[in-house]
Amino acid sequence: MNIRSLYAATAAAGLVLTLAACGSDDSNGSGDGDASGLDLVTDGTLTVCSDVPYAPFEDFDESSPSGFTGFDIDIVQAIADGLELDLVVKDSSFDGLQSGLALNAGDCDLAASAMTITEERKANLAFSEGYYDSLQSLLVPADSGIASIADLEGKRVGVQQGTTGEAYANENVSGAEIVSFPSDAELYQALQAGQVDALLQDLPVNLTHTTDGRYTIVEEYDTDETYGLAMKKDNTALVEAVNEQLAALRDSGEYDELYDTYFSEEAAQDAAESSDG
């Protein structure tokens, strides 16, 4: 499957959202928010933790006001704008985010890091309504001869520590060594260096490694995963405020515009041309 059809498949999956109908009457998805009564780390500021890089969801960008870019970053920027708050983004380890450690330690108000909502994580975290539906995928070198998960016996498969991709690999990969890495950056470097034979992780992230034709996605796995924004379990006021802003983004059409920026076929083509250039 080529990159254009892969992005089209991702778009079809991602548009099946579960945002609650608790929206505001705001017609443009920003402003008119009420940040009073929110238990924030810093008054007047929405402090967000994210594991960077994990393109296209989060990446470094010195030209951006926050110093970061990506779909998740755009979403939380819109939420902060709607609540009339400044946005500060902190680079954090994913393991500390999904376990609730970073939030409970007061490092940030919210974790936005392509985090799947799971029952295990809900024991330590409160989640917003879902804002993105994802797929898992298997990325391999184009000339590897690996055509499916069944061909991984005797191979080394890279996954990101603490992720649903790691869980899926442990449950479904037979006869292979599962090797965990802290982030996608280390994963991709290991694949390039030949230290692992394949990467099993979120489809949109694997897609970013296919633009030069050296690597290809041979399978996708529908795991019924939905990403949510994570907050402390006892900060119900912030959870409600975030859900209201997400619903307003949907109602105004701004969510669709942000989505198309990263996941449309045009976005895929732009990424490929950028890589070629």
Image: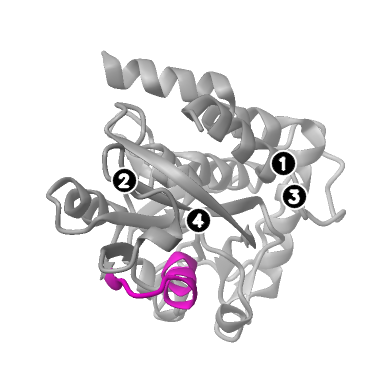
Q: Which residue corresponds to mark 1?
A: 15
Residue 145 has which mark?
2
**Residue at mark 1 to residue at mark 2: CA–CA distance:** 33 Å
Residue 114 has which mark?
4
The magenta-colored residue range is 163-179
Q: Amino acid at mark 1?
A: Leu
Residue 229 is inside the magenta segment = no
Q: Residues within 10 Å of mark 3 (few under 14, many from 20)?
A: some
Residue 175 is inside the magenta segment = yes
Give the mark nearest the N terminus, 4 or 1: 1
Point out the residue furthest to the left here.
193
Q: Which residue corresponds to mark 3?
A: 17
Q: Amino acid at mark 3?
A: Leu
Q: Residues within 10 Å of mark 4 (few under 14, many from 20)?
A: many
Give the mark nearest the N terminus, 4 or 3: 3
Q: Which residue corresponds to the image point at 26% horizontal and 68% vertical from the top-left?
A: 154
Q: Which residue corresponds to the image point at 45% horizontal and 39% vertical from the top-left?
A: 70
Point out the residue furthest to the bottom here.
123
Q: Which residue corresponds to the image point at 68% horizontal and 36% vertical from the top-left?
A: 255
Q: Which residue corresponds to the image point at 74% horizontal and 64% vertical from the top-left?
A: 240
